[in-house]
Amino acid sequence: MKLSNLDSAFYYLEDSTTPMHVGTLAIFRTPQEGLDYDSLLNLVEERIGLVPRYRRRVKEVARGLGRPVWVDDSDFDITYHVRRSALPRPGGDDQLHDLIARLISRPLDRTRPLWEMYLVEGLSEGRAALFIKSHEALVDGIENMEIGQVIFDRKPRPPELADDLWMPEREPSDARLLAGAVMDLVSRPREAADTLRLATKDVSTTVTKVAQGAGKLASMVWSAASNAPTSPLNVTISRNRRYAVAAVMLSDFRRIRARYGCTVNDVVLSVLTGALRNWLVSRGEPVSASTTVRALVPMAVYLEGAPEGPDSRKKLSSFMIDLPVGEANPIVRLSQVAHATEVHSTSGRSVDAGTLVQLSGFAPATLHALSARVASSFSQRGFNLIITNAPGPQSPLFSAGVQMTEMYPVPPLVKNQALSIGVTSYDGRIYFGFNADRAAMPDVDVFAAMLGESLDELREACS
């Protein structure tokens, strides 16, 4: 089966400094018999048939003459993909985040299915962590979900599934693929030319062109009126990363939303704007009343009053917003952000994404992957950073019978951007994941701490 034009675009877009994978970091507070490696391995083996692409690898066509194809991995080894790691006991959060930074710096092995999962043991206070990373070409959000969506359950006792009697299909020969590519060159020359440009790394315009024509990612504004403002967030990035997190109570955001008649997403963006302002000031950057940071915001939003669950209606909308980091008053910042998002929300540029909620209803990982695809297909000159926001379930989830207590997104970086922000709500809290270039933003942990300060500032102004 051929990769779609869009999947091919993301496959070829990857280079040594911008691995094209999206991740999830889940924390478990394990009981005496908790989440161990064997139980995790068994769970993944039982569920992987629900995401068949996770047993397929990419096979390229000679000389890039045609789109690559998905082929069953005849040597598929579940133990290669589901790995075990440990921190020196008692492992702290800083050590865990350093490990995650190293793991997200490494590209996935292209000779195998494009995903990895790590059980991290040795955390303090009897905790364990699960880190999952999947290539953006692997998850299209329509037919192919992220594997995290199928290994989490609403109840401690997972449902029983039928035995998965999988036998890999024989992969096509190189000669057969080449013959098919030649036929495509004759019958569909324009599409073949796009594939050739991608294969030869001419991706600057081809990815955007292909994504525009696909119509499956999300509705969005495809051209910015101008290039993004100059910012220390836009630099040549290295291969190495830093990772930091923050967690706050969802109730605080809901109270502010109720008082000012905006949305929780508005409050999230306003708090991030305040953190960006404080971070710029701490670095001695010039900040005037008119200073802005332009964010691309692929955002999955629950429709007001919609029930949570498999039939819940969502929309995925993507827009540019100039965050008013120059505004010192947190209430005015919130007002400006709310006005900007209202303009986009009433423009009709959104698509229903209710089909993303399947099985346990744990859709954030898939929605973050989908949002990363949106962002990667955009011209990076048009925005300073990406903020992906994917609401999650507000009741506990379980994996192999063990309750997940925290869930942090791990968004990818795009070329020439030093910071990417992922936001997810889960079980009464909002979780932020910050992926940063190691050299350009060594103080990402300082930025993470400033998010709490920004929220405090807004709460005090509201009181």
Image (cartoon, rainbow, N blue to C red):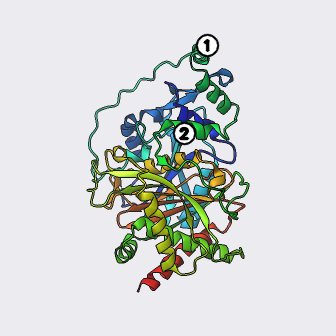
Image height check: is 215 above or below 458?
A: above
Q: Quadrant of residue 342?
A: bottom left
Q: Which residue is mark 1?
A: 175
Quick one: label 1, few (<14), some, or many (20+) residues within 10 Å?
Answer: few
Question: In front here: 351 or 165?
Answer: 351
Image height check: is 209 above or below 446?
A: above
Q: Which residue is mark 2?
A: 211
Q: Quadrant of residue 393?
A: bottom left
Measured as percent of width and height from the top left, residue 330 is found at: 51, 79
Amino acid on which disc 2 is placed: Ala
Q: Which mark is residue 228?
A: none
Question: In front here: 367 or 191?
Answer: 191
Element at label 1: helix
Q: Residue at x 41, y 39 (%)?
A: 142
Quick one: label 2, few (<14), some, or many (20+) residues within 10 Å?
Answer: many
Element at label 2: helix
Amino acid on which disc 1 is placed: Ala
Question: In front here: 97 or 447?
Answer: 447
Q: In the displayed structure, does residue 91 sit left or right of residue 169? A: right
Quadrant holding the C terminus:
bottom left
Instruction: Report whether residue 127 is seen.
Output: no
Is tag 2's residue or tag 1's residue first in the polypeptide sequence? 1
Instruction: Report whether residue 229 is seen.
Output: yes
Distance from the alpha carbon under mark 2 to that under mark 1: 29 Å
Measured as percent of width and height from the top left, residue 22 is found at: 53, 49
Q: Residue at x 71, y 75 (%)?
A: 286
